[in-house]
Image: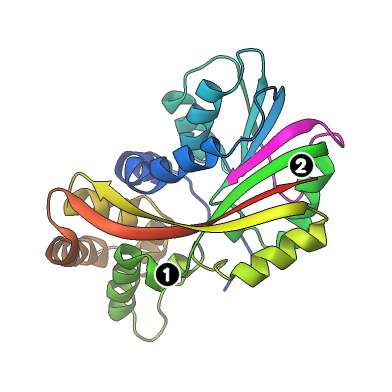
Amino acid sequence: MSNKPPAFVGSVPEKYERYLGSYLFEPYAKDLVRRIRRADIRTVLEIACGTGRVTSHLRKTLLPDAHLTATDLNADMIAIAREVVPAKDIEWAVADALELPFEDGRFDLVVCQFGLMFVPDKDRALSEVYRVLKPGGQVLLNTWDKLENNPAFFLADQIVSGYFPEEPPLFFHVPFSLHDEKELALLFERAGFKNCRISLVKMMGRNDSAMDTATGMMEGTPIYSTINERDPELLPVIKKELERQLGERFGKAPIVSAMQAWVVEGEK
């Protein structure tokens, strides 16, 4: 598996938001923001803000004069986030989680939803989070549980792999690669965080239709470019088969499927 983070560029971010945003990311965004433990927070950093699902809830929850900085490695994702969250009092920035462009001890809170899995050096990324947090500051982070425990994406991976048996695309394994509770605990311990709590959060994801879900999975993730590079004629074929099987297993309209993720809460 490549150490280079997968790129969410071109048409992918718009499809990602339109077809997967409310289904996958909205429920966990609400859960994450509910875990903010202080009401007097003044400075907040969001890493891997994606299309702004967490950003939106942060802006609604924080005090009006709190400064919110939302970053992502992909400028195309931030472009969609600006449309989703039109609030003017947000500082948007393209930033690498391995080299955060902020001074030591700047933030009261750092939040990262479903981003750490994509970072090639997780120890370094968490050390950067620790560095930019104020003493006593809080970190909130979530990461998907294993692929098999998120059955809609497990099905998508099986279907895609079936069309490329000799060299299956690996993208669907990346978001679900950081699923070991002990590994998460060690990562946060090595970074220096204390009073860490790790929780497994199970939810039911709901989307308008199996067709929308298949579109999001195949055109709203980097698997889109992978398949197009190998055989673009297969993309609509795989998408149609995925839509059919998703509909059979989880419903055609709406689709309802189980999902689960780990949530980590800690402090400096």
For residue 100, the mark is 2
State the image coordinates of residue 192 (x, y, percent, origin top left): 83, 55
Mark sitting on residue 233: none
Whether residue 231 is visible, yes or no, is no
Q: Are marks 2 and 1 in contact (CB under 8 Å)?
A: no
Label located before the other in sequence (2 or 1): 2
* Viewer-nearest residue: 104 or 32: 32
Q: Does the magenta segment cover residue 96?
A: yes
Circle 1 packing at 10 Å, graded few (<14), some (14-19), many (20+), is many
Q: Name the residue under label 1.
A: 147
Q: Quick one: 130 or 170, which is closer to the camera?
A: 130
The residues colored magenta run 94-112
Q: Residue 19 is drawn in which quadrant?
A: top left
Which residue is located at x 54 percent, y 36 percent? 33
Callout 1, which amino acid? Leu
Helix or strand or loop: what does disc 2 sit on?
loop
Against 153, is 84 above or below? above
Q: In which quarter of the image is the N terminus?
A: bottom right
